[in-house]
Image (spheres, rainbow, N blue to C red):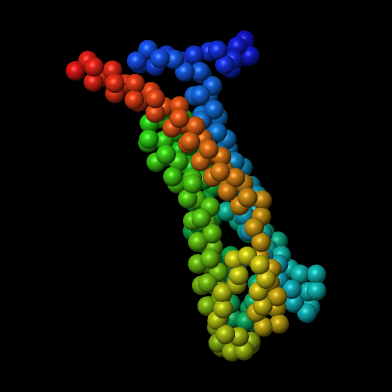
Amino acid sequence: MLKSYFASDVKVLLPDGRTRPLTAYLIPSFLLMLGGLLLIISIFQPYWSMTMFAPQYPNGLKVDVYVNQLSGDVREIDSLNHYLGMPPLDEGGQFERSISAAAITALGLLLLAGVFVHNKWAAILALPALLFPLVFLADLAYILYRYGHSIDPQSPLGGAIDPFMPPLFGEGLIGQFRTIASAELGLYLAFTAVFVILIGLWFHRAAYKPVVDARTAVSGSQS
């Protein structure tokens, strides 16, 4: 039965009497749902990480940034940054982390809603999900900028270091400290979701534009 359901000879009747294969409508629905699922799975994976090397920590101290939490050597890095007069890592992006899980879940639900929207509004519903990875990176860059420009000059080492911005990706040097920042699995999943969603929207348009055109043609002939 399942085989016959997905068989290429199963047709959908258009308003003008033409037919199209059922798979033409199943493919975009599957891709949009897959994109939403990838975004939701990404919540449970780190999006970005930074490893800091210092003379007393030759093996490095690493912090993993999830959309809703920080993990790793956060306490040790905060203790080092204290001497530079820099705020704790957890102070940056508190609001974003507090709403991120619910927000990403909402993006997934919007994609699911797009499955049941058979016109151009499906792309509008998908737009927030498409923009999400870029918004995350832009917000992270802003947090890093503020973080590096919050040095307290009255701290023990604050006067010895000029304001800076830790790199979003790659290697950076801050006094005697070296940092390496990189994307992690969560961010890769988010960008994969964007790729899947774009393909899904292409198939969505290919599937439903003929339906809209057929309805327009039938309405025009009746009037």
Q: Where is residue 206 in the image (x, y as percent from the top left)?
A: 45, 30
| Residue at x 69% of width, y 68% of height | 180
Q: Is residue 113 visible?
A: no
Q: Where is residue 161 in the image (x, y as percent from the top left)?
A: 60, 85
Where on the picture, by quarter, is residue 73?
bottom right
| Residue at x 80% of width, y 74% of height | 58
Q: Where is residue 68 in the image (x, y as percent from the top left)?
A: 57, 53
Where on the picture, by quarter, is residue 165?
bottom right
Please determine whether, in this image, residue 110 is positioned above or below residue 60.
Answer: above
* Count of marks overlaid on the render: 0
In the image, 116: left or right of 65? left
Where on the picture, by quarter, is residue 214?
top left
Please determine whether, in this image, residue 147 is positioned above or below residue 37.
Answer: below
In the image, 64: left or right of 35? right
Question: Outermost residue, left direction?
Answer: 223
Please determine whether, in this image, residue 27 is positioned above or below residue 136.
Answer: above
> Quadrant where the N terminus lies?
top right
Please name whichever residue, 140 or 56, is drawn nearer the observer in this view of the structure: 140
Please name whichever residue, 188 or 98, is drawn nearer the observer in this view of the structure: 188
| Residue at x 35% of width, y 16% of height | 15
| Residue at x 49% of width, y 58% of height | 95
Please name whichever residue, 120 or 137, is drawn nearer the observer in this view of the structure: 120
Please name whichever residue, 11 or 77, is drawn nearer the observer in this view of the structure: 11
In the image, 215: left or right of 155? left
Q: Can residue 220 be seen in this view?
A: yes
> Quadrant where the C terminus lies?
top left
Q: Where is residue 123 in the image (x, y as percent from the top left)?
A: 42, 39
